[in-house]
Image (cartoon, rainbow, N blue to C red):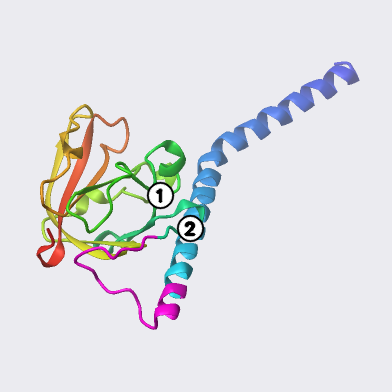
Amino acid sequence: MPVARKAVVTVLIWLLLCAGIVLVLYPYVDRWMQEKQQTRLLNEWKQYKNQLATQTGSPPPISQAPVSVEKPGDDGVLGMISIDKIGLEEPILPGSEEEQLRIGIGVVEPDRKPGEANNYVLAGHRSWTYGKQFSRLNELAEGDLIRIESGNGNFEYYVTDTFLVKPEDIQVLDNSRGKSEITLITCDPPRNPTHRLIVKGTLRNGGK
């Protein structure tokens, strides 16, 4: 084999090897980058809440009704959702497009705020490529606690129901009448989903 041709073949082999390595590593690198962004957003939110507590002299209380001031954190972060039972702690972001769902939990109805008499709807991915997010949402059951931190207060919801719906069944987004509810939405099953897993909750302490 001529030297020039041998060199070309060697280069092609190395390129194919590199391409294969990139394809194998990409999901892991992508996941690491998304988790790094999630951590940064959570840290920024926690710093904001700590600064707020320092200014007021006490940490924000668990609220039954929202206060009048709402201030998002950096990068449009609206708050944080945490569910102790499944080890969940994720930033809440405005909107439910891929841009938001890749790095956190998205607000589906932007005009609704937690703690108010409405249906506060949040959506999240379940695929491992994007980190945990709502990957363990199926483990929740009636009575489990969902905590929401936001610029207008901290709120606790108790899970009241979990069920599956078809993707086209959008009644779960309907606003509640005089009740403070939360709806969490994710895909089911995680791979090749055919349905949506819905978790419904009601504001603790009899909030409307």
Residue 64 among those drawn in magenta: yes
Question: Looking at the figure, which quarter contains the N terminus?
Answer: top right
Main secondary-structure element of the magenta-colored stretch: loop
Three-letter amino acid code at the position of disc 1:
Leu
Give the x, y percent position of residue 125: 35, 42
1 or 2: tag closer to the N-terminus: 2
Residue at which label 1 appears? 93
Asked where in the image residue 11 lies, by quadrant, the reply is top right
In the picture, measured across the screen, residue 145 lies left or right of residue 6, that is left
Q: Is residue 130 above or below residue 150?
A: above
Residue 203 vertical position relative to residue 21 in the rendered view, above or below? below
Rendered image: mark on residue 41: 2
Type of residue at label 2?
Answer: Leu
Q: Secondary structure at mark 2?
A: helix
What residue sits 25% from the left and 50% below the top?
137
Mark 1 residue crowding within 10 angstroms, few (<14) / some (14–19) / many (20+): many
Q: Nearer the viewer, mark 1 or mark 2?
A: 1
Residue 62 x, y percent position in the rendering: 25, 71
The residue lying toward the viewer, choosing from 19 and 60, is: 60
Q: For the view shown, which residue lies furthest in the bottom direction? A: 57
- Local crowd size for mark 2, using a 10 Å CA cut-off: few (<14), some (14–19), many (≥20): many
The residue positioned 16% from the left and 49% from the top of the image is 200
Between 91 and 208, the residue placed more toward the observer is 208
Q: In which image quadrant can residue 82 be found?
A: bottom left
Q: Are marks 1 and 2 in contact (CB under 8 Å)?
A: yes
Q: Residue at x 27, y 59 (%)?
A: 86
Q: Residue furthest front?
A: 68
Q: Which residues are magenta?
A: 51-70
- Rounded to the nearest whole Å, what is the CA distance between mark 1 and mark 2? 10 Å
